[in-house]
């Protein structure tokens, strides 16, 4: 993946510098980003958030709030881990020391929205952080928290971000239901302690020695259906009415 910014004449900008950033036409869409490679949406930055020449948020394929001035580095922390912060252009809404909190809120809002609007569909969320890449600018809530200096505080911030996201996921439930039309319904489930969790209608003799061998061979042109639905929900299965959702799913005919 490679972002392509263009100038007012529509010519691509291939260099990274302050002058190159000034040439960007922010009324144009940015080409080559995640939404051009299969992602439904994107929120983030073009490079390391608090390092590169462009300090501005990209929402899908545009920068809603373009940079307006050169960053004032005199207002930023000064310590050995504050290096690697180029004198680029910064947008008015870009908080150099709280950027990871912005990313965290976006991801948490996405998870909550998905559960509210598309709980019967799986989702993929790629959450990237500035922490713990230099410069180490821990947010206000983490400064001095570890007594291990700014970089230690930055590591603590990363740990907290991961914990917040994991807590959100733990508060959600994931139900996997097997459709009656699926091959060898009801399927057996193959689960192992290291994280494997899968439907397995083939290894039936491994679960019950009295059953015939489950090996299945398809001839050319033959097919079989494996139908399952993931349901993401809040709270316990009963309060989320998972059984009702499955009954409705079981009536679907495709």
Image (cartoon, rainbow, N blue to C red):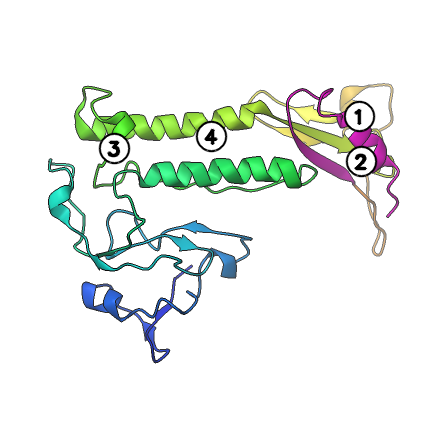
Distance of mark 2 from mark 3, alpha carbons? 55 Å
The residue to which callout 4 is attached is: 165
Instruction: Give me the residue at 56% from left, 53% from top.
Output: 40
Task: Name the disc covering residue 54, or none.
Answer: none
Specify whether 110 is left or right of 134: right
Distance of mark 1 from mark 4, alpha carbons? 27 Å
Kindly check if marks 2 and 3 are in contact, taking CB atoms under 8 A apart as contact.
Answer: no
Earlier sequence position, callout 1 versus callout 2:
2
Instruction: Give me the residue at 16% from left, 55% from top.
Output: 87
Q: Which residues are magenta?
A: 227-254
Earlier sequence position, callout 2 versus callout 4:
4
Distance of mark 1 from mark 2, alpha carbons? 31 Å
SS at circle 1? helix
Q: Position of residue 199 (x, y in %)?
A: 72, 32
Specify whether 236 is left or right of 75: right
Distance of mark 3 from mark 4, alpha carbons? 18 Å
Q: Magenta stretch containing residue 107, yes or no? A: no
Q: Image quarter for residue 243?
A: top right
Kindly check if marks 1 and 2 are in contact, taking CB atoms under 8 A apart as contact.
Answer: no
The residue to which callout 3 is attached is: 138
């Amino acid at each position: 993946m490679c972002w392509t910014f263009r100038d007012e004449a529509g010519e691509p900008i291939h260099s990274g510098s302050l002058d190159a950033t000034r040439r960007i036409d922010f009324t144009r869409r940015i080409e080559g980003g995640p939404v051009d490679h299969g992602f439904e949406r994107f929120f983030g930055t073009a490079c390391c958030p608090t390092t590169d020449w462009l300090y501005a948020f990209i929402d899908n394929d545009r920068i809603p709030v373009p940079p307006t001035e050169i960053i004032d580095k005199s207002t930023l922390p000064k310590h050995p881990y504050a290096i690697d912060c180029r004198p680029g252009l910064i947008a008015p809404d870009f908080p150099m020391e709280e950027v990871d909190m912005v990313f965290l809120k976006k991801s948490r809002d996405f998870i909550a929205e998905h559960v509210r609007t598309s709980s019967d569909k799986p989702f993929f969320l790629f959450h990237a952080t500035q922490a713990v890449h230099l410069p180490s600018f821990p947010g206000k809530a983490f400064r001095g928290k570890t007594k291990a200096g700014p970089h230690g505080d930055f590591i603590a911030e990363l740990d907290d971000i991961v914990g917040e996201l994991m807590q959100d996921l733990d508060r959600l439930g994931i139900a996997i239901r097997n459709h009656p039309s699926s091959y060898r319904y009801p399927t057996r489930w193959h689960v192992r302690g290291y994280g494997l969790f899968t439907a397995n209608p083939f290894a039936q003799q491994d679960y019950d020695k009295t059953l015939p061998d489950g090996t299945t061979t398809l001839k050319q042109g033959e097919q079989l259906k494996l139908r399952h639905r993931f349901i993401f929900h809040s709270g316990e299965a009963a309060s989320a009415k998972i059984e009702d959702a499955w009954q409705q799913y079981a009536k679907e005919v495709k």
